[in-house]
Image: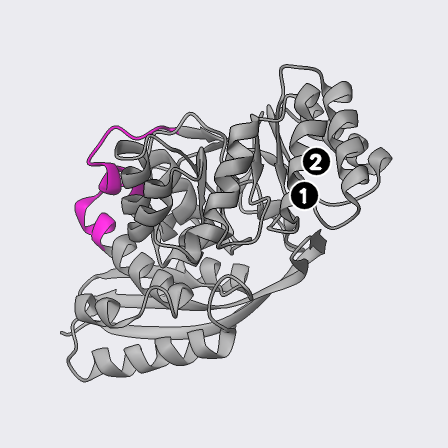
Amino acid sequence: MPPTITVESFELELESPLKTAAGTIECRRGVLVRLDAEEYVGYGEATPLPGWTESYDRCEQTLRDVADAIATGTSVRNAIASIHATATPAARHGLSLARLDLRAQRCGLGLSQYLAGGGPRDAVAVNATIGDGSVASTVAAARAAVDDGYQCLKLKVGAGAVTRDIARLRAVRSAVGPAIELRADANGAWNQTQAEHVVRAIDDASVAYIEQPLAPGSLSATNDLRAIGTAIALDEECVRTPIDEILRAKAADVLVIKPMAVGGIDRAFRIARLARLVGGVTVVITTTIDGPIAHLGAIHLAGALTTDTACGLATADRFADSTPDALTVTDGRMDVPDDPGCSQTVGSETGIKNWYGIES
């Protein structure tokens, strides 16, 4: 019997809006992808994010067109190849994750084991993300995260005045002490002058790196910032500029890879290995604040890469509904599940649909 694809829409509300320099996120709307092949069922998730991926409407239509093509004889592999990873990365992520989920189940392996060929980590370190706010509220959130066991904090900066961001970073460093890793994420909000001012002003705050200080397309200017001293991570740049071009330019110390934004777990895995093996660049895996199946896929990816670096995966508690047990954070770490595939960790078909708010 030929494989079949089913796509269903969902919308997940956030517990509270997340304010960043790129805008405020209040909910996540996406498409759940189900792949049936023989006795196995694989699930994937396509959750577009404006500014990072295609629109929701384009994502949904792409997946419905692909489902029709598969129904008339196109192979799943060829269907994935037909989805443009740059133009419609979320759609490709959804279908390719469903296929990976199914294939790993067939092998009786967790997705991380399937990707790595054995020997992945059983847990990954994660950072706490602290949104924009006053100095006092930022310090309070940082202390609370450290009390919860996080050893790495990422502060969202760039939404307000540069002077306030400098004060926030210095105040957090003073509050949490020298042992906690501190990162800053500007989402490309600064110009060159502002970025240089921040880099010099926070020299005594021991910031591990500044993420995307400049707008994408500024590789030479980013290199100038690196020369000042603070390490630079690129995030938005990774979905707008080919990775090999970034590596050739030696424009980053760290690449922040979002599977949903680069077109899938499989593509993210290849990009991460290329960055680490060829460019000697640290890789941080993070999400675009996704639902549970995409979130689990990113955790499996981080586990397969056996990274020691804290990843941006502690996002499940941002949703209004309760967090699935598999996505909880304990002492700044998340377990890499060993259930076959990826989606089985969320539960049965009914459990999956319930979490996504889809009627059975």
For the residue pair 296 and 214, the one nearer the viewer reads as 214
On residue 193, the disc is 1
Instruction: Indicate whether 236 appears above or below 327.
Output: below
On residue 89, the disc is none
Kind of element beneath mark 2:
helix
Q: How many marks?
A: 2
Residue at coordinates 47% horizontally, 58% vertically from top-left?
Answer: 351
Residue at coordinates 50% horizontally, 30% vertically from top-left?
Answer: 310
Specify the amino acid type for callout 1.
Answer: Thr
Q: Which residue is mark 2?
A: 197
- From where the camera sits, is residue 151 visible? yes
> Whole-Å distance between the Cαs marked 1 and 2?
6 Å
The answer to which quarter of the image holds residue 142 is top right
Instruction: Indicate whether 44 appears above or below 196.
Output: below
Residue 255's x, y, as percent?
Answer: 43, 40
Specify the amino acid type for callout 2.
Answer: His
Residue stretch rendered in magenta on the structure: 103-122
Residue at coordinates 78% horizontally, 48% vertically from top-left?
Answer: 160
